[in-house]
Amino acid sequence: MKKYKIIAVFIIALAVCFAIHNLTAENWNVVTMKENIYQRYDSNNGILQTFKEAFAAKNATGKSDMVGLMARAINGEARGETYVGQVAVGAVILNRTENSKFPKTIPGVIYQPGAFTAVSDGQINLPISSKTSAYKAARDALNGWDPTGGCIYYFNPSTATSKWIWGRPQATRIGKHIFAK
Amino acid sequence: MNKFREKLLDFKKRLSDRHMYSIVITVIGLIAVWGMYQLKSEMEFHQKTENQYNRAFFETVEYVQNVETLMAKSMIANTREQGIINLSEVWRQANLAQANLGQLPISQLALENTAKFLTQISDFSYSLVKQNLNGGKITQKQMDDMKTLYDYSEKMSNNLNQLQAELGQGRIKWGELVKKGTPIFNSSSKNFTTKQFENLEKDFKEFPSLIYDGPFSDGLRNQQPMGLTGDNIKQSQAKEAAVKFIGIDKVKDIKPMGTTEGTIKTFNFQAGLKSSPAMDSVVIGISKKGGHPLLYIFNKKIERESVNVEQAKAAAKKFLESRGFNNMEETYYLKEDGVATINFAYSEKGVTIYPDLIKVKVALDDGEIVGFESKAYLTSHRERKIGNPKITQEQAKKIINPKLKVFSSGLAIIPTPGRAEKLTYEFKGKVEGRDFIVYVNADTGKEEQILLIINTPNGILTM
């Protein structure tokens, strides 16, 4: 009887390895495809957010689900942060779309390879309810609330390994993140 | 220890059992098959991503080559029409090149100046298209800028050709960079591919700053906020201003939360309210110069709605007036999750000045103010000399589409993407059940902007 148990354990272990591997291997492929899909829906290329804001907060409930995408990015990146810390992360995403050095759309910025750890490790795919603070923070950021004063980078000083990032002009610190230009 | 040895001996004994041998061999066989299957699917996934990256790369190359030729054509185009056609193609193709460049698995930093170049050549061309359409002639300075941009696009195109050849020979592999995405099979990236792209980026390190009428022009970044009147204040004064802004009777305690060294520098404070004592729920930013409120964030939990939008608008207006913002006219609103976000524009002598924008959030449970944002207002508000329009409203009305059934009109100052301002006539009207706002330049009689209005249960949106 005992050997059957050993075999059973083996097979279960194999199945688990298999599942884990597939999940991780698929990640990048999905990331690139998602970027393409979202980019196609982000129809407001070329018109700056600040310009649009002058008339109305357009993006907040547009046809495309930019709030949801941004909320999941915020959730993945700054789940443990205070509310204002979450708005700040959203503001950085938005500030990047208005910076010449970055892609011009929200999905382009979020899915830029290597730009956000929450995208690289798939945490952005965690489903969240529209009642969470990440959702509210995403809306505030899209409506133009920017606690960072126009920053395009942020990092966690206790885990940041890049020397370069320390050289950027720092604007403020909110929770665990330092925000830089 | 002994127990372990016993177990080991027992295992050895059982292995010598013939039955057990066959089982072990089967298991090893299974693992081998599984491993092969895994390898195959891993390679397939790998190939798929590699293909995506190759597509993005080759498209970038193609678009940049087109930009180079189109720039050359634009420079010799002698009629307005040819100029417009070629430059609008530059605008489009450079934009596509920039989007594809952003999809390459290369650190954003490694290619940031290249990306900036593509943004600016696209943006610059668009500004020239608009200038051309309005009958403007290309100036000598713009001609020189075009020459510079052309030279850089030629260099970039050559470099990309070089990289394309290396990719063809298999010397560029996105693989290592891609691996970063799979934490379990993490391999240290040798930055092999990034190195190859260094040459491309190197050329743009020296790229001169470009000033033109567009949102990505280098001139815009140095603009000083015009609404920041007054002297620099101390933190203690800012604290007083913060308490006064939130409401002296509402604040339970307040403490500093550092500063923000942004375009508008602020002292920040965290506050606990009597109604909501948790310290992290309220944050306020007061400008160092003049002590103007810039930002107020209150993450209030709203259980039920008992205030309607009209009441919320009135509450917001009353709040603005009590904080010294007079002549603010409500323009649009949005209702989400029990909160109404209401936009206000400054209004002077009947002219709506859209660039001077303040947003106020009102909680729909009891009409409390839960958000305030005045970056646009502090950036652009000043005493303006509003000139007399050169054309009359009647003349302007003749310019717009006759199908538009106008139900309200008036003068308005609107922003342009290049942060200039234009005096216009604003016509709100309907065509086939759809709401539009059309802006006609009050001096030149040109249509400046058309907005499509979407009425949703949650508010009015413009597109």
Image: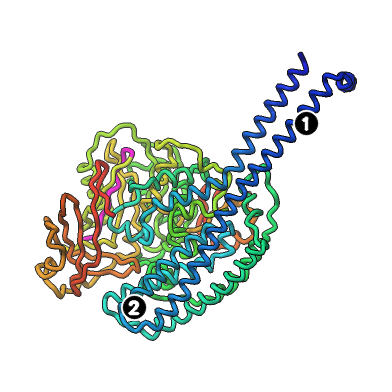
Q: Please tell me the numbered disc located at residue B28.
A: 1
Q: Is residue B44 magenta?
A: no
Q: CA distance from mark 2 to mark 1?
A: 71 Å
Secondary structure under tag 1 reads helix
Crowd rating for badge 1 (residues with CA inside 10 Å; few <14, some 14–19, many 20+): few
Quarter of the N terminus of chain B within the rendering: top right
User: Residue A50, how many percent across, how many down?
Assistant: 35, 59
Q: Which amino acid, mark 1? A: Ile
The answer to whether one can see residue B440 in this image is yes
For residue B201, side relative to residue B139 (left or right): right
Q: Which residues are magenta?
A: B337-348
Q: Residue furthest top?
A: A1
B427 vs B338: above or below: below
Is B340 one of the magenta-colored residues?
yes
Q: Are marks 2 and 1 in contact (CB under 8 Å)?
A: no
Instruction: Of the two numbered discs 2 and 1 on the same chain, state the one appearing first in sequence.
Output: 1
Q: Quadrant of residue B79?
A: bottom left
Residue nearest the viewer, comparing A40 with B266: A40
At 67% across and 59% down in the image, what residue appears?
A: B191
